[in-house]
Image (cartoon, rainbow, N blue to C red):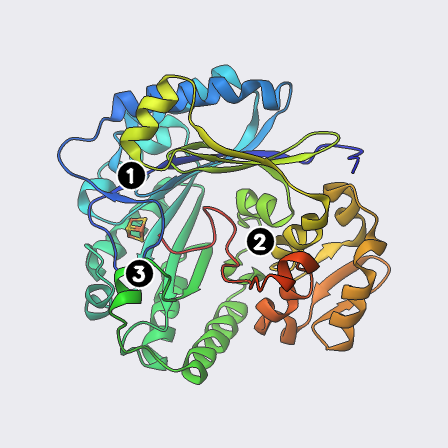
Amino acid sequence: MKLAELPPLSLYVHIPWCLKKCPYCDFNSHEKRGELPEAQYVDALTADLEASLPNVYGRRVHTIFIGGGTPSLFAPSSIERLLVAIRTRLPVDPDAEITLEANPGTFEVDRFRGFRDAGVNRLSLGVQSFDDAKLAAVGRVHGADEARRALDSALALFPSVNADLMYALPGQALEQALGDVKEAIARGVPHVSAYHLTLEPDTHFYRFPPQLPDDDLAADMQEGIERLLGEAGYGHYETSAFGKPGHRARHNLNYWSFGDYLGIGAGAHGKISFRDRIVREVRERKPQGYLRAALAGDAIRERREVDAAELPFEFMLNALRLIEGFPVALFTQRTGLALNVVEPQLRAAEGSGLIERDHARIRPTAKGQRYLNDLLEGFLDPRAARAGARVINIASPGTARPS
Ligand code: SF4
């Protein structure tokens, strides 16, 4: 493979602690016990970034996403120190989108102004629902009124705000799921991420499954949510993402366009392109182990060059999440491969009514969006397919799930 140009670069920073582990969550998040080692963790992130600089030398960062975990558990002064450390080591676009994930507890809301003053310009808030009983059913530590206060406060302070909502919650009726979306719209949030609650392996809900709405009801919820948001002027641009004009998540769009991202922090994933190869990295997962390893300049636990045979699937895994699909030329720009290497798969997907294409774009049809896993499986490397691999997780790292 040979890339004519390198893709845009984003930076993902993982902060791995939460007040309490939610029963549906398979993220690398750990219950906070006692004081968080904030200062030491920022030092570790800085050391991790420094050790990574040779891989991104001379490249500019377009977006920063501080995710978790619950990054709003960190003091604004720690977030400011982190952002200063980043800006002094890497060129960051003056108008870079800088997102911080936050939970709606009172403790966190008191810090919102400080986060904004530190340079955060987009807050992603884990609302999930405006219904106390449903929040309790999914083990959230906040209530509906806290979610309302947090959202109003975020909207008053930040130029852009996302509200994470979940639907198909235990015992949820159609009207309840739609009620959550109506309230988010009424409060004026410019971006909504609406996630179908799924039971992921290695979670409490997987071991002790709650009674969830059946597939037909969940599909009705999804359809109703898309209709309500569409009528209210939100563009549906990715499986779960809806934004008013000018509020699409640039960081996530870079993942979905198969852009590059440096991932620092416990368990963070990264994808970095070079002219002749694409490399994936994973950091030490356990917070204490990460602190030690990163401070010693040795946080990476896995680094591998992506085989050219895997690139078509990896590209499609991201780009076909986009409702508008992707420009034909992007495939070659990002993978260094000619589009004709996937011509048989494209033809098969087109024949099954899963994609449509013209000379300019390739996009999933409504059927392709609904059966995204089936569509993606067509692009699996045949060796992986023969070994029985299935598409089990269509989320991009660190973005496409409720937090
Ligand atoms: S869902 Fe979010 S708040 Fe809950 S444990 Fe996972 S990362 Fe933490």
The label on residue 72 is 1
Q: Which mark is residue 245?
A: 2
- Label 2 neighbour load within 10 Å: few <14, some 14-19, many 20+: few
The mark nearer the N terminus, 3 or 2, is 3
Position of residue 399 in the picture relative to residue 74 (left or right)? right
Query: Upstream in the sequence, badge 1 or badge 2?
Result: 1
Q: Quadrant of residue 332?
A: top right
Residue 236, position in %: x, y? 57, 63
Q: Secondary structure at mark 1?
A: helix
Q: Could you classify mark 3 by the number of other residues whose Cα lies within 10 Å: few (under 14), some (14-19), or many (20 or more)?
A: many
Relative to 30, residue 149 above or below: below
Which part of the image, by quadrant, shows the N terminus? Answer: top right
Q: Is residue 119 left or right of residue 72?
A: right
Q: Which residue is mark 3?
A: 24
Q: Is residue 23 left or right of residue 52?
A: left
- The kind of residue on which mark 1 rests is Ser
Label 3 and label 1: CA atoms lie apart by 20 Å
Q: Nearer the viewer, residue 315 or 126?
A: 315
* Tag 3–tag 1 contact (CB < 8 Å): no
**Secondary structure beneath label 2:** loop
Quadrant in which residue 130 is drawn: bottom left
Mark 3 close to ligand 1, CB under 8 Å? yes
Q: Type of residue at label 2?
A: Pro
